[in-house]
Image (cartoon, rainbow, N blue to C red):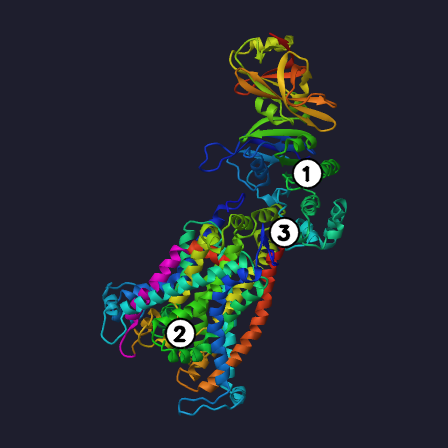
């Protein structure tokens, strides 16, 4: 049973006021694929490196299984890591790269060869076993980096943005392969990425980090439909959620329409303290047609299967851009005047980011 | 390397070892400096650590005697020869490196080989013809002949190193400059020289070191006038009497300029040797 | 890097001339300074030119070369040259690598130690030779003997009894910093994530060094050997100042010097020796240049 646990793990760099990783608490189950996601500087790579033993802890502890590994050397932690730039051993062949860790463990040569061959077969690397990294393409190098990890049977796999250097098409392809592989091998995996699409499609659970602090850790669906704060709401989902600052007016208004909440939503809003709130709804919850909120179409992005309509309207004296997702075919064109209506989940956040309520709402004319 | 799990004392032990090695390796230099402050009695007996320090030896070696080479003269000669030759080396090597790196001519590898191959010719092999040429051109005993020879001595190294530094400059910058109409001079002044300045400094420093310390050509071609500091040092060896302290003082004075320059610029020199040499 | 005629947007460049002329000053200067004396040496080597006793110069064909073939002093000098160069290059490479490994860590006063270690390279060769001869190796006043005696041994006249090795020791002392700097650059150019991967893969520091670092250092070591050989094969200052070529410590540069302007004044013969040395150097150079082109090729792949 190899779970991984971060307990108030903290990393501080001398000279910077904020911690790179601040009091991180994470419980990762045996066999789980957990994704650490966040913008650059969020501490996700640092947290991974702390788990690897490449960064020391300034506070808290890290457990692999039942063992406190906070002060244990990387080579004694029984982990395997895939690096962002692959970090392949330049002077060794593909086969030697993949067998390197086994050689350090003293695994006898025959067994090494067998295991390397097996991993090479799984990753389609057999024709390249005798080549050196400099003679491989980016995609091939990435597979060697993966192969180096899977040839071992460690307690935990660590992956630091392993797909970010691949071109877009290869990335999508490889994503699926990684997920399948992890499911088959059943090894606990901690996966770092800055790409929220990767995070949503790969992880059993996703941990969102910002400025070293954990924002929310949940299954992708939960993160999408029930973001626990403003940052998560705006970070997850593409195009991003429409976030409208409606000030401290009650009832809340967008443009010259009123936002009408369902019973639960209205109650929560009343119970909450007065002050500026932010209303959020995803593009698919915004309908373009003949609704009460007048707006102008800026551009129409026709992706074939769906259409993203970029709109603009006046709200509280300033220009408010909104995005709507409509099904194809869509009749509107840039410059058209249209009416908008909300038909779906609406979130309300306080100005400092915490969530007040998730409810349904619709717009009504003033 | 602040690594997790490494025992604290490992780093301290290596640090201590490094200090020990450094001090032992440096010891001969230290000893030379100490000796330069001793009287001849103290210097010419079994090694003594404690003594009455005196500046007399420095006074001895720097006084000017008629008919003998003085420190002041030797220093002036060396400074002149080293600075002028290094400047000429840079003036010649920078365009050459341009032609080998920025817009490489088709046979750049062969040319580079040729330059380095001239260092394989033992200096000793060419000294005779050079001596004869110098005599015929009335250049014996002048500073000019040393300037010419040191330039030739350092040029291959300078071309080699500058070429590697110039290669570091992103090609897009050069292309942009060409589109903007800049020729060789424009590109050099606005892009290449500023960007490669540390590399040029490192190259110049190495040229200065080799030229300042050069002894063979100096002694063969300039026995009397135009003598440089290395020659002056050897004049402080006498066959009668004790001379060790005096020699030490002379050695310290002779070595000081280059040692100080090397100390100050060592980071640059390291980068220079590394990049200039490898890439 | 494009090596064919580039065209700049809009106008074609006369690639030949415009590309080549910046190289010419340096090239012409070097050719004049090196090839002319070389040609002259060949000419002299075919004569019997002597100054003492003054002899009219006349062509004697290859007889100087046949004398050389039988000259055992020349053979000894050649052998001494080889000994000195090989031991000095390898010795300074080994020591330099060890020092570089020590310096590759962070510790208090690292910069100071590095400064101390590079100083020998900055010193004038004649000064280094004199310091070692008179202060370290000296039979009576030398520091080494002082240490030896305090350890219970007897004092040794290093320079008289082991002239060649005394010179080699001084050479190693002076050239170790040079090798150290090159190797240090090599150590610091290892990509950090490769070393981290090795740590995660279970490699001990020793295993990392043997299996990864050494092969990474190879081109740096080759370069050190190449440059070191170029300079060390020509050593003159130390020989002149420490032993004057005495018992068996004459290397080829000093030998040629002795025969020509250093007292022998047999210019014809000395020139023949020089030519032979040049030919030998060319052979060595061709080998070395193979190494060089391996280094330069490495650029293309990267």
| Location of mark 3 (residue) | A89
* Quarter of the figure that contains the C terminus of chain C: bottom right
Q: What element carries label 3?
A: loop
Q: Nearer the viewer, residue B79 or A274?
A: B79
Q: Is residue C77 visible?
A: no
* Quarter of the figure that contains the N terminus of chain C: bottom right
The lab-note entry on whether marks 3 and 2 share a chain reads no
Q: Of label 1 and label 3, which has the lower sequence position?
A: 3
For residue A168, the mark is: 1
Subunit bearing disc 3:
A
What is the x, y in percent for residue B250?
30, 68
Q: Which residue is drawn at 63% across and 21% down?
A: A335
Q: Residue at x 44, y 54 (%)?
A: B268
| Location of mark 2 (residue) | B217
Tag 1: Cα neighbours inside 10 Å, few (<14), some, or many (≥20)?
few
What is the x, y in percent for residue A294?
62, 14
Q: In this view, does C105 lie to the left or right of A96?
A: left
Q: Splitting the image into 4 quarters, where does residue B279 fall?
A: bottom right
Q: Is mark 1 on a helix, strand or loop?
A: helix
Q: Which of A287 and C74 is in front in this view?
A: A287
Subunit bearing disc 2:
B
Q: Splitting the image into 4 quarters, where does residue A183 fall?
A: top right
Subunit bearing disc 1:
A
Q: Residue furthest front?
A: C11
What span is in magenta?
B239-265
């Amino acid at each position: 049973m190899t779970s991984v646990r971060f307990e108030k793990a903290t990393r501080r760099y001398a000279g910077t006021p904020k911690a790179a990783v601040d009091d991180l608490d994470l419980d990762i189950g045996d066999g789980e694929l957990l994704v650490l996601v966040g913008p650059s500087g969020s501490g996700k790579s640092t947290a991974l490196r702390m788990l690897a033993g490449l960064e020391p802890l300034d506070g808290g502890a890290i457990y692999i299984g039942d063992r406190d590994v906070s002060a244990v050397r990387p080579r004694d932690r029984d982990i395997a890591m895939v690096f962002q730039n692959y970090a392949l051993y330049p002077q060794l062949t593909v086969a030697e790269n993949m067998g390197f860790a086994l050689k350090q463990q003293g695994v006898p040569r025959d067994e090494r060869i067998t295991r390397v061959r097996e991993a090479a077969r799984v990753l389609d690397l057999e024709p390249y076993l005798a080549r050196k990294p400099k003679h491989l393409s980016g995609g091939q190098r990435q597979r060697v980096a993966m192969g180096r990890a899977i040839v071992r049977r460690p307690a935990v796999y660590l992956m630091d943005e392993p797909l970010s250097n691949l071109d877009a098409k290869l990335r999508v392809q490889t994503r699926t392969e990684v997920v399948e592989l992890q499911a088959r091998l059943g090894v606990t995996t901690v996966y770092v990425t800055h790409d929220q699409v990767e995070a949503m499609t790969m992880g059993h659970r996703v941990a969102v980090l910002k400025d070293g602090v954990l924002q929310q850790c949940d299954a992708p669906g939960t993160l999408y439909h029930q973001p626990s704060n403003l940052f998560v709401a705006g970070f997850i989902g593409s195009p991003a959620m429409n976030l409208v600052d409606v000030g401290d007016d009650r009832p809340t208004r967008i443009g010259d329409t009123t936002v009408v909440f369902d019973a639960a939503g209205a109650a929560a809003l009343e119970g909450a303290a007065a002050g500026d709130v932010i209303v959020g709804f995803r593009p698919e919850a915004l309908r373009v047609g003949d609704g009460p909120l007048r707006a102008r179409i800026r551009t129409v992005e026709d992706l074939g299967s769906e259409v993203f309509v970029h709109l603009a309207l006046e709200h509280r004296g300033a220009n408010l851009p909104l995005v709507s997702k409509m099904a194809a075919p869509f009749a509107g064109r840039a410059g058209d005047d249209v009416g908008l209506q909300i038909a779906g989940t609406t979130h309300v956040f306080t100005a400092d980011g915490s969530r007040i309520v998730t409810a349904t709402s619709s717009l009504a004319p003033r | 390397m602040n690594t997790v799990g490494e025992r604290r004392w490992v780093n301290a032990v290596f640090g201590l070892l490094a200090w020990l090695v450094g001090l032992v390796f440096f010891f001969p230099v230290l000893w030379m400096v100490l000796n330069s402050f001793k009287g001849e009695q103290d210097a010419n007996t079994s090694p003594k650590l404690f003594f009455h320090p005196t500046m007399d030896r420095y006074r001895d070696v720097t006084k000017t005697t008629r008919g003998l080479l003085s420190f002041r003269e030797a220093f002036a000669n060396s400074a002149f020869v080293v600075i002028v030759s290094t400047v000429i080396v840079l003036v010649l090597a920078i365009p050459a490196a341009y032609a080998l790196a920025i817009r490489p001519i088709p046979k750049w590898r062969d040319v580079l080989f040729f330059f380095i191959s001239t260092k394989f010719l033992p200096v000793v092999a060419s000294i005779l013809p050079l001596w004869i040429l110098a005599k015929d051109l009335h250049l014996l005993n002048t500073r000019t002949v040393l300037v010419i020879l040191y330039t030739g001595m350092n040029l291959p190294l300078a071309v080699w190193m500058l070429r590697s530094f110039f290669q570091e400059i992103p090609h897009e910058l050069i292309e942009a400059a060409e589109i903007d109409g800049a020729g060789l001079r424009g590109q050099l002044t606005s892009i290449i020289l500023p960007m490669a300045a540390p590399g040029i400094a490192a190259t110049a420093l190495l040229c200065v070191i080799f030229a300042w310390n050069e002894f063979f050509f100096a002694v063969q071609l300039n026995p009397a006038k135009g003598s440089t500091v290395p020659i002056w040092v050897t004049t402080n060896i006498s066959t009668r009497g004790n001379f060790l302290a005096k020699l030490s003082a002379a050695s310290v004075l002779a070595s000081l300029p280059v040692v100080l320059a090397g100390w100050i610029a060592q980071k640059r020199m390291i980068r220079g040797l590394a990049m200039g040499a490898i890439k | 890097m494009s090596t064919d005629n580039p065209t700049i947007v809009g106008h074609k460049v006369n690639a030949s001339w415009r590309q080549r002329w910046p190289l010419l000053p340096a090239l012409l200067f070097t050719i004049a300074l090196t090839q002319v004396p070389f040609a002259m040496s060949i000419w002299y080597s075919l004569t019997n030119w002597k100054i003492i006793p003054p002899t009219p110069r006349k062509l004697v064909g290859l007889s100087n070369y046949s004398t050389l073939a039988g000259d055992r002093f020349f053979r000894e000098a050649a052998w001494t040259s080889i000994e000195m160069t090989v031991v000095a290059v390898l010795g300074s490479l080994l020591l330099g690598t060890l020092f570089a490994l020590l310096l590759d860590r962070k510790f208090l006063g690292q910069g100071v130690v590095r400064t101390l270690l590079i100083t020998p390279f900055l010193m004038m060769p004649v000064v280094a030779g004199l310091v070692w001869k008179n202060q370290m190796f000296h039979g009576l006043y030398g520091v080494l003997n002082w240490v030896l005696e305090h350890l219970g041994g007897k004092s040794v006249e290093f320079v008289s009894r082991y002239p060649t090795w005394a010179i080699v020791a001084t050479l190693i002392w002076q050239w170790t910093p040079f090798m150290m700097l090159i190797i240090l650059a090599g150590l610091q150019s290892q990509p950090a994530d490769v070393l981290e991967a090795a740590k995660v893969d279970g490699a001990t520091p020793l295993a990392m060094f043997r299996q990864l670092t050494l092969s990474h250092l190879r081109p740096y070591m080759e370069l050190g050997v190449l440059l070191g050989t170029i300079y060390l094969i020509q050593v003159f200052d130390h020989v002149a100042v420490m032993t004057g070529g005495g018992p068996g410590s004459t290397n080829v540069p000093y030998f040629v010097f002795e025969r020509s302007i250093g007292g022998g004044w047999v210019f014809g013969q000395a020139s023949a020796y020089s030519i032979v040395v040049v030919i030998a150097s060319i052979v060595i150079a061709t080998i070395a240049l193979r190494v060089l082109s391996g280094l330069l090729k490495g650029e293309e792949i990267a």
